Image (cartoon, rainbow, N blue to C red):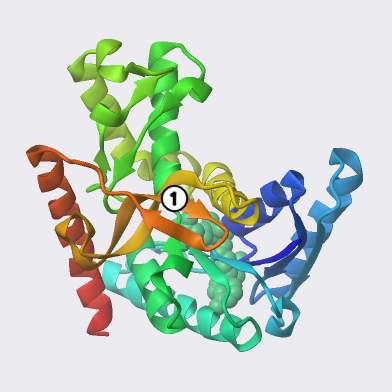
Amino acid sequence: MSKVTVIGAGNVGATVANVLAHKDIVKEIVLVDIVGDLAKGKALDTWQQAPIDHYSTSLIGTSDYADTANSDIVVITAGIPRKPGMSRDDLISTNANIVTSVVKSVLEYSKNPIIIVVSNPLDVMTYAAFKASGLDRSRVFGMAGILDTARYRAFLATELNVSPKDIQALLLGGHGDTMVPLPRYTTVAGIPVTELIDSEKLTAIVDRTKSGGGELVKLMGTSAWYAPGAAAAQMVEAIVKNESRIYPVCAQLTGEYGLKDVFVGVPVRMSKNGIEDIIELKLNKDEMQLLNDSAAAVKEVMDVFDKM
Ligand code: APR
């Protein structure tokens, strides 16, 4: 049974730990935060839920990386949200420093973990973690696509008045305004979505998905945590259970889709070794253009990080 470390015991990190504990598929979860008591408190709270919800996953909270020793999987949610007056570059620099130091600390105690990055801005934070780790690209990737796809599927379920369970979809590209939804690959119980919804409504849903994170920030004054936490826990599940699930994740491309040395969302097959394969779809010209634009936008931010 696996040991999973979750770094950052804020809203998202605590949700990852809580959802994962409920799945009852890992032996131990270590929740780490610079605010050690926060991590301890949230781990204890989730452990006290175990007798009620019936799971055996043990949890500890800590700020000491020695407790993370021999982790199989590490989920990174540490970071700070953008504050008023803070430039995007300041945010990148602050969070990249956090992610870099977290990765270095983790690797002091775990030799070859799989690292799942959740901290934003996602694509460049995944790059920062990859760079700091020196691990193979199959073992360092980011969670964005499952969340973005879930938002898209949820909006479609509401519009079509069907269960979200029956909606399958795929998104490519960066996590943000330039994400690339693929209506051609969206089905409702196998029925192409384009047969069920007119293009105007579909475009509106795609646009809402693109600003899905911002919609929640506006409502709550902070970014979301239930769906992001559940999405990261689902990735852990695919790895721990060696499931061969097909998920969109932020991965380093080394020639796939004609793109090189950029971190963007693509469908992958996920199993015990992390990314087992990157799946290359046969995109049409318009879709390829959107993906290229998205990759160029991510590359720009990666370059900002490289120059820091
Ligand atoms: N090491 C460990 N924990 C850290 C560090 C660090 N170097 N720096 C900050 N943290 C912790 C904070 O103490 C805080 O508890 O990270 C946690 C972040 O939690 P929240 O502020 O609640 O943020 P959250 O909503 O969980 O989002 C975390 O995930 O989805 C992304 O955009 C989101 O980048 C953000 C991240």
Q: Which quadrant of the structure image shows residue 100?
A: bottom left
Q: Residue furthest bottom?
A: 108
Is residue 7 in view from this perspective?
no
Measured as percent of width and height from the top left, residue 136 is found at: 42, 75
Q: Quadrant of the C terminus?
A: bottom left
Q: Mark 1 sits on what residue?
A: 269
Above or below residue 98? Residue 87 is above
Please give the name of the residue rendered at 40% of the width and 64% of the height, measured from the top-left corner. Answer: 83
Kindly state the secondary structure of the residue where label 1 is placed.
strand
Q: Quadrant of the N terminus?
A: bottom right
- 273 and 8: which is toward the camera: 273
Lateral position of residue 107 relative to residue 217, left or right: right
Please give the name of the residue rendered at 32% of the width and 27% of the height, measured from the top-left corner. Answer: 186
Q: Residue furthest right?
A: 51
- 222 and 53: which is toward the camera: 53
Q: How many marks are shown on the rendered structure?
A: 1
**Which amino acid does the dot numbered 1 rest on?**
Arg
Is residue 182 in view from this perspective?
yes
Q: Residues within 10 Å of mark 1 (few under 14, many from 20)?
A: some
Measured as percent of width and height from the top left, residue 249 is found at: 40, 53
Measured as percent of width and height from the top left, residue 52 is found at: 89, 40
